[in-house]
Amino acid sequence: MHGRKIGRTIGFPTTNLMPDKSKLLPPDGVYVSLTTIDGKDYPGITNIGHNPTVGATPEKRVETFLFDYDQDLYGKFIQVSLLSRTRKEETFGSLEELKAQMDIDLADGRNYFSQLGLL
């Protein structure tokens, strides 16, 4: 689904997912994830929560950033598997602070996949 496109303004375009309302989602936070698109797996990181830094949303959101992927995903069915929770959702004082933490999250995710020999 189309989101607010805030991630792309700070260098982290995400795919915004709409899980079925019957799905039980895990605790809010950042997760290392593997996303399946058209039968192929792509490593990345996923945030689950209410996006408190950029204007908290009443509904829980699921957003995934895929490493080294730049294709259009609108209208595609994708499956996201959460592999490891790296931190809880936090509120940052600015977009710059959020971006700095996302750089850390990205490095942690890449390291996770490197240790498995998948990057």
Image (cartoon, rainbow, N blue to C red):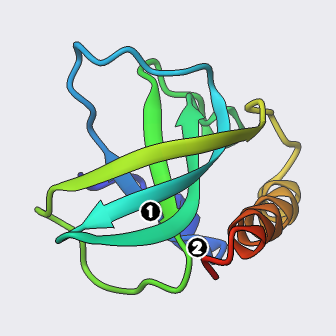
Q: Residues within 10 Å of mark 1 (few under 14, many from 20)?
A: few
Relative horizontal placement of residue 99, taking residue 35 as reference (left or right): right
Residue placed at 40% from the left, 86% from the top? Answer: 70
Camera-side residue of 35 and 51: 35
Q: Which residue is mark 2?
A: 9
* Element assignment for label 2: helix
Label drawn at residue 65: none
Q: Residues within 10 Å of mark 2 (few under 14, many from 20)?
A: few
* Element assignment for label 1: loop
Label drawn at residue 5: 1
Residue placed at 55% from the left, 34% from the top? Answer: 48
Q: From this viewpoint, which residue is outermost toward the front?
A: 117
Q: Is residue 28 above or below residue 11?
A: above
Camera-side residue of 42 and 102: 42
Relative horizontal placement of residue 78, taking residue 88 as reference (left or right): left
Task: Estimate the x, y position of residue 87 in percent, counting from the top left.
Answer: 80, 37
Residue placed at 62% from the left, 25% from the top? Answer: 28
Numbered circles on residues, count: 2
Q: Which image quadrant is residue 29 in?
A: top right
Q: Which image quadrant is residue 77 in?
A: bottom left
Residue placed at 38% from the left, 14% from the top? Answer: 24
Camera-side residue of 33 and 54: 33
Task: Estimate the x, y position of residue 96 in percent, counting from the top left.
Answer: 84, 63
Relative horizontal placement of residue 72, taking residue 102 as reference (left or right): left
Q: For the residue marked with disc 2, what is the amino acid?
A: Thr
Task: Estimate the x, y position of residue 43 in percent, counting from the top left.
Answer: 53, 68
| Distance between mark 1 and mark 2 Cα atoms | 7 Å
Q: Are marks 1 and 2 in contact (CB under 8 Å)?
A: yes
